[in-house]
Image: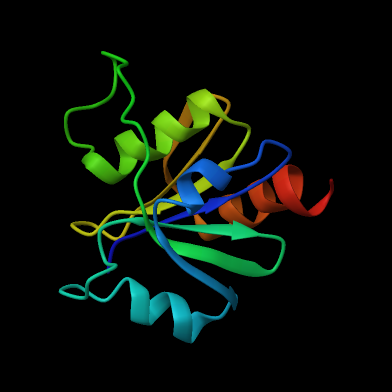
Amino acid sequence: IGAIITIEKDNSLNAYIEKAIYLDAEVSFELFSTIFTPGTPLHDGAVIVRGNRAMCAGAFFPSSDKYDIPKSLGSRHRAALGISEVSDAFTIVVSEQTGNISTTIDGVININISLDDLRMSLKQNILLR
């Protein structure tokens, strides 16, 4: 199951939330697994998280125009990189094809990170704020 989860930091993502399916729901495994199940209406867009709330699903971000993005990365990765170029948001991407985890922040993508690296990155970029 692929996923794109964007965590709002200081820059508001209201412009993207307003164009998506509004949720304002508590973040949970059950919610995310339902949203990102292939074939469901919200499967392709991003979930935007504010605090401990999933504000919306089905959000679409501008794609990055960088030329040095590996061709093996798809539209989720390009959207995650794109939102990191226009905001301070932290985004987690799970590849639908491989299950590999990547993150983006400040216009940088970290590809195929481990779960331990993800935990560390979350602590550094979200939890220790």
In the image, is residue 101 above or below residue 73? Answer: below
In the image, is residue 116 above or below residue 62? Answer: below
- Residue sitting at x 72%, y 61%: 51
- Residue sitting at x 17%, y 28%: 71
In the image, is residue 104 above or below residue 71? Answer: below
- In this orientation, which residue lies closer to the viewer: 48 or 120? 48
- In this orientation, which residue lies closer to the viewer: 1 or 65? 65
Quarter of the image for residue 80 reads top left
Q: How many marks?
A: 0
- Residue sitting at x 30%, y 17%: 65
Q: Is residue 71 left or right of residue 37?
A: left
Q: Quadrant of the N terminus?
A: bottom left
Farthest-out residue, front: 18
- Residue sitting at x 69%, y 69%: 52
In the image, is residue 122 above or below residue 39? Answer: above
Q: Is residue 96 left or right of residue 93?
A: left
Q: How is the image coloured?
A: rainbow
Q: Quadrant of the C terminus?
A: top right
Farthest-out residue, bottom: 30
- In this orientation, which residue lies closer to the viewer: 11 or 37? 11
Q: Residue 5 at what x, y percent from top left?
A: 47, 56
Q: Residue 27 at what x, y percent from top left?
A: 59, 75
Q: Residue 48 at what x, y percent from top left?
A: 52, 56
Q: Residue 116 at what x, y percent from top left?
A: 59, 57
Farthest-out residue, right: 129
